[in-house]
Image (cartoon, helix red, strand yellow):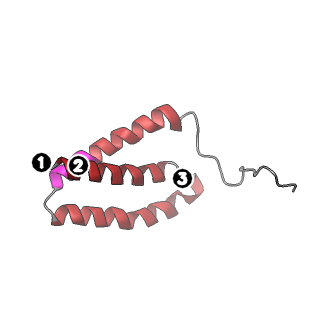
Amino acid sequence: MNTEYILLFTVIITFLLLLLQRTERKKRLIVLIVLALPALLIRNWIAFRDLEQEGIIAFGIALVLNFVFWLFIGRYNPVTSSDEIQVLGLDD
């Protein structure tokens, strides 16, 4: 088992899942479609290099890390709609 690949895959998959998690609900389908390409490339690279076990372990770790992030930060700071965001300093 190659721990460098586990770490690399964990960081990449965690980032992709975090982007999906912190997207507002109206834009989530668009982001999912855009993130499908990097996810597909990573899956193909894992299959090409015969690193299925490392990929599964990294995906499990990424799910746990994203759940912990949601548990401590995401629940108390939900994603707001872009319509509700106000920029300070604008007079209108």
Q: What element carries label 3?
A: loop
Report x, y in % for residue 91.
Answer: 87, 54
Taking the image as shown, residue 62 lies to the left or right of residue 30, namely: left
Instruction: Give the magenta range.
Output: 52-58
Q: Is residue 30 one of those drawn in magenta?
A: no
Quarter of the image that includes the C terminus: bottom right
Q: Which residue does the image show at 52% across and 49% down from the upper left?
A: 22
Q: Circle 3: is it few (<14), some (14-19), or many (20+) Cα within 10 Å?
A: some
Report x, y in % for residue 78.
Answer: 58, 41
Q: Residue 6 carries which label?
A: 2
What residue is shown with label 3? 23
Report the amino acid beneath label 2. Answer: Ile
Which is the main secondary structure of the residues drawn in magenta? helix
Q: Which residue does the image show at 83% across and 55% down from the upper left?
A: 90
Among numbered discs 1 and 2, the one appearing first in the sequence: 1
Q: Which residue lies furthest to the right in this view?
A: 91
What residue is shown with label 1? 1
